[in-house]
Image: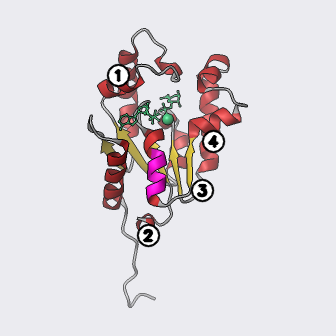
Amino acid sequence: MDNILKDISVYLIGMMGAGKTTVGHLLAQELGYSRFFDTDTLIEQLAQGQTINEIFATAGEEAFRELETQVLAELCTYKRTVVSTGGGIVLRQKNWSYLQHGLVIWLDVPVELLIKRLQEDNSRPLLKDTDPEKKLQMLLEQRQPLYSQADLRITVQPQETPEQITKRILAEIPLVLKPPVVPPSDFN
Ligand SMILES: Nc1ncnc2c1ncn2[C@@H]1O[C@H](COP(=O)(O)OP(=O)(O)O)[C@@H](O)[C@H]1O
Ligand SMILES: O=C(O)C1=C[C@@H](OP(=O)(O)O)[C@@H](O)[C@H](O)C1
Ligand SMILES: [Mg+2]
């Protein structure tokens, strides 16, 4: 896989709860990439240890998005790295110019499954809503056309484990990589 990817980095995108953070770790291991980063973790470090919830509450979503862009701009200079992004990273056009430094993979998970996974989770400020399922559905509708710009879409099945998803990503990566340009032998 190392050779096929030619050291390029991988960016995981998709909705909150899609498993980007969970799968990203495993994918880095399987690719033999020593670097794994989660943009949310880096944002929290940049904000002097404030949680994502605290950043949203004190500085607001726009300030969070600024930090997100700042973090991504740095990460995109790295090769041989897996980056798990936050679900809203696709919203800014500028972020796409950074994401496109690597292979962009969309973990596509049905809303019913996202809701199950995030039921007990209070770490997503955008889901502090009277109807989190409706909110997720609305966000997905807004973002679906953006996620669709990924190089590879992985439609996750309800029972699929993070390990199985990682294996499937590894199997599907070669299908979306452009073959290297080999000049004809008499080319000079
Ligand atoms: N394939 C999976 N099957 C079951 N639970 C999962 C799977 N992937 C992730 N989870 C769980 O769902 C929650 C959200 O996962 P996470 O990796 O944080 O998603 P994201 O980073 O996309 O928001 C976590 O509790 C995680 O353990
Ligand atoms: O979808 C979003 O806008 C967000 C997703 C979160 O990351 P995960 O996708 O890892 O949950 C986090 O960046 C923040 O709460 C905003
Ligand atoms: Mg995450």
- Label 4: few (<14), some (14–19) or many (≥20) C-alpha neighbours in 10 Å: some
Report if the CB atoms under discs 3 and 4 are less than 8 Å apart. Answer: no
First-in-chain label (2 vs 4): 2
Report if the CB atoms under discs 1 and 4 are less than 8 Å apart. Answer: no
Report if the CB atoms under discs 1 and 3 are less than 8 Å apart. Answer: no
First-in-chain label (1 vs 4): 4
Q: Nearer the viewer, residue 120 or 17?
A: 120
Per the rendered image, the range of residues in magenta is 24-30
Q: Which residue is mark 3?
A: 78
Could you tell me how far apart the alpha carbons at marks 1 and 4 are, in whole angstroms? 27 Å
Report if the CB atoms under discs 2 and 3 are less than 8 Å apart. Answer: no
Report if the CB atoms under discs 1 and 2 are less than 8 Å apart. Answer: no
Could you tell me how far apart the alpha carbons at marks 1 and 2 are, in whole angstroms? 39 Å
Q: Provide residue 79's location: percent of width, then percent of height.
A: 56, 59
Could you tell me how far apart the alpha carbons at marks 1 and 3 are, in whole angstroms? 34 Å
Q: Quadrant of residue 154?
A: top left
- Label 3: few (<14), some (14–19) or many (≥20) C-alpha neighbours in 10 Å: some
Q: Provide residue 41's location: percent of width, then percent of height.
A: 60, 37
Q: Which residue is mark 4?
A: 71
Instruction: Specify whether residue 149 is in view.
Output: no
Q: Which residue is mark 1?
A: 137
Could you tell me how far apart the alpha carbons at marks 2 and 4 are, in whole angstroms? 27 Å
Instruction: Specify whether residue 115 is in view.
Output: yes
Secondary structure beneath dot 3 equals loop
Q: Which residue is mark 2?
A: 3
Q: Nearer the viewer, residue 158 or 8?
A: 158
Residue 2 horizontal side relative to residue 108, left or right: right
First-in-chain label (3 vs 4): 4
Report if the CB atoms under discs 2 and 4 are less than 8 Å apart. Answer: no
